[in-house]
Amino acid sequence: MTTYFDILGVKKNTPLADVKRRYKLLSSRCHPDKGGSKSMMQLVGLAYEKILSGHGHEEAVQVVYLKSNDQAAIWKKKCQQLEDQNQDLQRRNDLLEKKLKTAREQQKTQQQEPTDAEARQQQMLDEDMQALRRENRRLQFQIDALRREKTSTKIAVVKSEIPGQLVVASRKLTPAVTGQIKAIGRSRYWGRLAMLGIPIALVWLAMGPGKEPLMSVWNSFNPEPQRVSKPAMRLLHHDTTQNQSSNTVQVALPVEGAVDKEIIVPRIKLSSDVGIWQVSKFENTPNYYISVRSEKGSYVIKSCGSDFQYYKNTLLRSGRMAANLIYSRDERHFEIYDIPYGNGSFAHNWAKSKSLLINNEYFPNKNFSNSFSALQQYCQ
């Protein structure tokens, strides 16, 4: 007799959670969409309902006698197939339960029993801990012994009539230790005398007969810089009897002297246009340059044969300058910085960007390409 317990592959004392899990497994396998049939799915559902209602021990498959032998054979064949499938599912269920039980036992054993490596490591840690404890006890014993020795030895120090000397009354002190203590007292006495005598000797040397030797030594280490006199013109001879048309004046110049050539510092022209590169000429030289003005009144210029320069408006609030801005000089209300490298030091930096940020000021590149081309023509 095949019961509903046999169809699901469970027993009478099986928990409801396992019965439900078994029902879901058989439903996924017997579903028509998963290769099963509608009748098998109905049979599994009926068995699950009977077990939940407490009628799982009833007979699930009954023999029906039909008049037609053909139909009886068909039904008999279907019942045999169901019996075979039920037995196969029971075997699979038993195998899976055994595997699950074995895996749980192995996991429990691994958790309870540590590995050999962990055991060896724990043993080494225990040995190190014991060694540290023994060393700690030994050091503590030495400290206690030193404290007891210090307590038992009393030293009384009394000032003697002679200044700078001490009379030491001690117990359990060797003559060597007593001599060291007396030497310390004498060294302190002579040290105080030296601290008072050295300043007096220095003052005497500076104000008395030692002044000239000290000055000679000071001059040897700090020589005075040689003063270079400026070249001067001197009129040697002027002959009034010569022809008036000949205004010749003989001038004698120093042989070793050299006249410095006056250096002309170029001055830029101030502009009211903001954010536009323009070609201009310096105020005091015939050279050309290109420049752009920011909204804060600063400039970035480029002239022939020089790097880009940043003219910072000193009326603005000063801040920390970038590393690539090298200070050059001051001019009017500008601080001039060279830009030898970094941001804004090359023409392609300006050509490939809409604007550049220099010292928290934005300088656009509007009309830069045309102005730079014009400057190259002037520089040839």
Image (tube, helix red, strand yellow):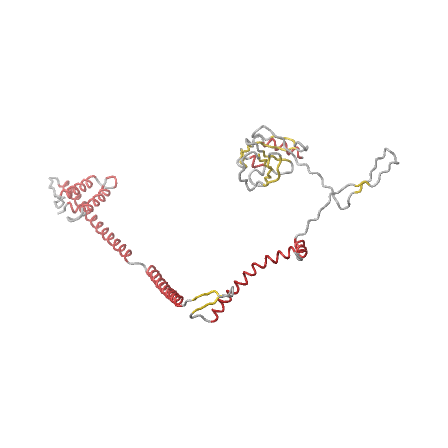
- The one nearer the camera, 296 or 315, is 315
- Residue farthest along the top direction in this orientation: 272
- Residue farthest along the right direction in this orientation: 241
**Residue 248's x, y, as percent?**
83, 37
Q: Residue at x 22, y 51 (%)?
A: 97
Question: Taking 310 as reference, is 217 above or below it?
Answer: below
- Residue farthest along the front direction in this orientation: 161
Q: Residue at x 73, y 44 (%)?
A: 229
- The one nearer the camera, 261 or 251, is 251
Q: Quadrant of the C terminus?
A: top right
Q: Quadrant of residue 210?
A: bottom right
Question: Taking 359 as reference, is 91 above or below it?
Answer: below
- The one nearer the camera, 252 or 97, is 252
Question: Taking 305 as reference, is 14 above or below it?
Answer: below
**Residue 357's x, y, as percent?**
53, 36
In the image, is 298 to the left or to the right of 4? Answer: right
**Residue 29's x, y, as percent?**
24, 43
**Residue 169's x, y, as percent?**
44, 68
- The one nearer the camera, 328 or 307, is 328
Q: Quadrant of residue 290?
A: top right
In the image, is 286 to the left or to the right of 14? Answer: right
Q: Quadrant of residue 326?
A: top right
